[in-house]
Amino acid sequence: MQAIVNISLKNGVLDSQGKAVHHALDALKFEGVKNVRIGKQIVLNLETNDEAKAREEVTQMCEALLANTVIEEYTIELVK
Amino acid sequence: MNVAITLFPGTNCDTDTQYAFEKLGHKATILWHKERTIPANTDLVVIAGGFSYGDYLRSGAIARFSPIVEGVIAHANKGGKVLGICNGFQILTEARLLPGALKRNEHLHFISKHQHVRVENNQNDFLRLLKVGDVLNLPIAHADGNYYADAQTIAQMEQKGQVLLRYSDASGAISNPNGSVGAIAGICNETKNVFGLMPHPERAIEILLGSDDGIKMLQGFASL
């Protein structure tokens, strides 16, 4: 089973990279972009096929290492 | 004073830090990251600056789980003094020994220059030889120095005297190079034995190299 973890800065925490990319899109005349948030994706190939077990383990990984929950939030998507 | 300095793969300020403390008359030993304990006679642990583990994932995130940091946490929990400089500050926030986190600089640049900082609080071992309002000239060199903590945490830190240094200009007026909340450059924990700052006091110990304002900071840790 594969776990796809998406990590981004929490709402309310200024995303400087997103802001810079937004400015660059404006400069390229791409109009109508309200805001840009940049995050990172971590793809984990897991041995288990048990969805509940996978979610529990990956949540622990996120809390311990993959995300810094002081400034970041994460979502976990499981793919069989 | 016996100083122990941590060395991870990617640390690059270990020998500068050792040189600074030795020049000030102290014994400074470098500890490899695979050590699990801090020598019992250690008065101060310094987590030196650099780019531990290539800043992979987040600055300090991988180093935080190395064996030596277990020793640093045990030392801090016993009331032992710990100073994190630059990457050391990042590691201490990742280890939750200090509140908040360090984000990418507001304008995304790596900043390497001399920067003034203003002393906000001297009721601690680190800044006790300085006066509140003193302006120091220290080198900064970082990409992830943008200090963040939520408003409630900042309010508690202010109230408990944990905000130690703010970025300023030469006159002491706030001047923020990296977007840090409240222009915060250095903090301590609630029990005032764990300290972290982005500027490099160990690189400011000789006038010939631009400033010796770091001496009074590092010497603060030496016993009275």
Image (cartoon, helix red, strand yellow):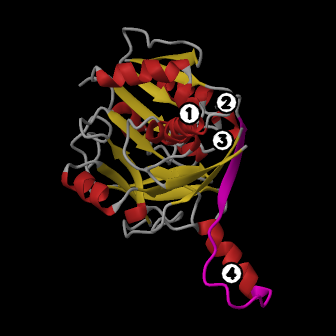
Is residue A36 located in the magenta-colored stretch of the structure? yes
Q: Residue at x 68, y 34 (%)?
A: A49
The kind of secondary structure element at disc 3 is helix
* Residues marked 2 and 3 touching at CB (< 8 Å): no
The kind of secondary structure element at disc 4 is helix
The amino acid marked with disc number 1 is Lys
Is residue B107 visible from the viewing direction of this image? no
Residue B55 in the image: above or below residue B184? above
* Residues marked 1 and 3 touching at CB (< 8 Å): no
Residue B177 is tagged as: none
Q: Residue pushed farthest top?
A: B40
Q: Chain of mark 3?
A: B
The kind of secondary structure element at disc 1 is helix
Q: Position of residue B42 (x, y in %)?
A: 39, 14
Q: Residues within 10 Å of mark 1 (few under 14, many from 20)?
A: few
* Residues marked 2 and 1 touching at CB (< 8 Å): yes
What is the CA distance from the residue labelled 4 to the residue labelled 2?
A: 43 Å
Q: Which is in the foreground here, disc 2 or disc 3? A: 2
The amino acid marked with disc number 3 is Asp
Residue A23 is tagged as: 4
Q: Residue at x 55, y 12 (%)?
A: B35
Residue nearest the viewer, comparing A44 with B200: A44
What is the CA distance from the residue labelled 1 to the residue labelled 3?
A: 30 Å
Q: Earlier in the sequence, mark 2 or mark 1?
A: 2
Q: Chain of mark 4?
A: A
Q: Which residues are magenta?
A: A27-45
Q: Residues within 10 Å of mark 3 (few under 14, many from 20)?
A: some
Residue that badge 3 annotates: B55
